[in-house]
Amino acid sequence: MYIPPGFHTITPYFFVKNADRFVEFLVAAFGGIEVLRSVRPDGLIANAQIRIGSSMVMASEASEDYPAMPSACYLYVEDANKAIKQAIAAGGTLEMAVSDMPYGDRQGGVKDTHGNIWWVSQRLVQSPYST
């Protein structure tokens, strides 16, 4: 099985209204890098690919056939406090304050400008599960 570079077996795909602003949020909030953008005849995004860390996400402008739908993603970062502040500065709203979790992550939550929730986590232990 061939998977293109930068992708994994599962890739989040977002259908959102104002997809161009969603891409801007991903870049500003999470340091995303827009890798590719294709547009429909009406000028709206047909497909955008944004790399966040080692993962790729895709986004398209919502339509009648593919309406906007919120999602939730779990995002690992180096510094959860800094990442949450950056996401809020980019227009997100605090969903959950950053705190240490019993499963070994320092985690907070932010809702993006399109209603998606991002659980932003910094791993505190060097093991797959907390002990």
Image (spheres, grey):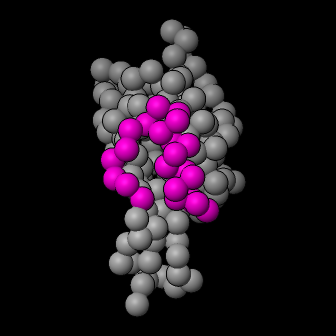
Q: Looking at the image, which is closer to me, 90 or 49?
A: 90
Q: Looking at the image, which is closer to me, 41 or 104?
A: 104
Left or right for 67, reference 110: left
* Residue 125 location (% of width, % of height): 53, 81
Q: Is residue 76 above or below residue 123?
A: above
Q: Is residue 44 above or below residue 54?
A: above
* Residue 74 location (% of width, % of height): 44, 57
Count of picture labels: 0
Q: Which quadrant holds the C terminus?
A: bottom left
Q: Any magenta on residue 11?
A: no
Question: Splitting the image into 4 quarters, where does residue 55 fall?
Answer: bottom right
Q: Identify the residue at horizontal 53%, vertical 23% (top origin).
A: 20
The answer to whether residue 30 is seen in the rendering is yes
Q: Which residues are magenta?
A: 77-98
Left or right for 104, reference 63: right
Q: Is residue 73 above or below residue 16?
A: below
The answer to whether residue 7 is seen in the rendering is no
Q: Identify the residue at horizontal 64%, vertical 54% (top origin).
A: 53
Q: Which quadrant holds the N terminus?
A: bottom right
Q: Residue furthest top?
A: 42
Q: Residue furthest bottom?
A: 131
Left or right for 113, reference 6: left
Left or right for 113, reference 122: left
Q: Any magenta on residue 83?
A: yes
Q: Identify the residue at horizontal 51%, vertical 42% (top origin).
A: 87
* Residue 83 location (% of width, % of height): 55, 51
* Residue 88 location (% of width, % of height): 47, 39
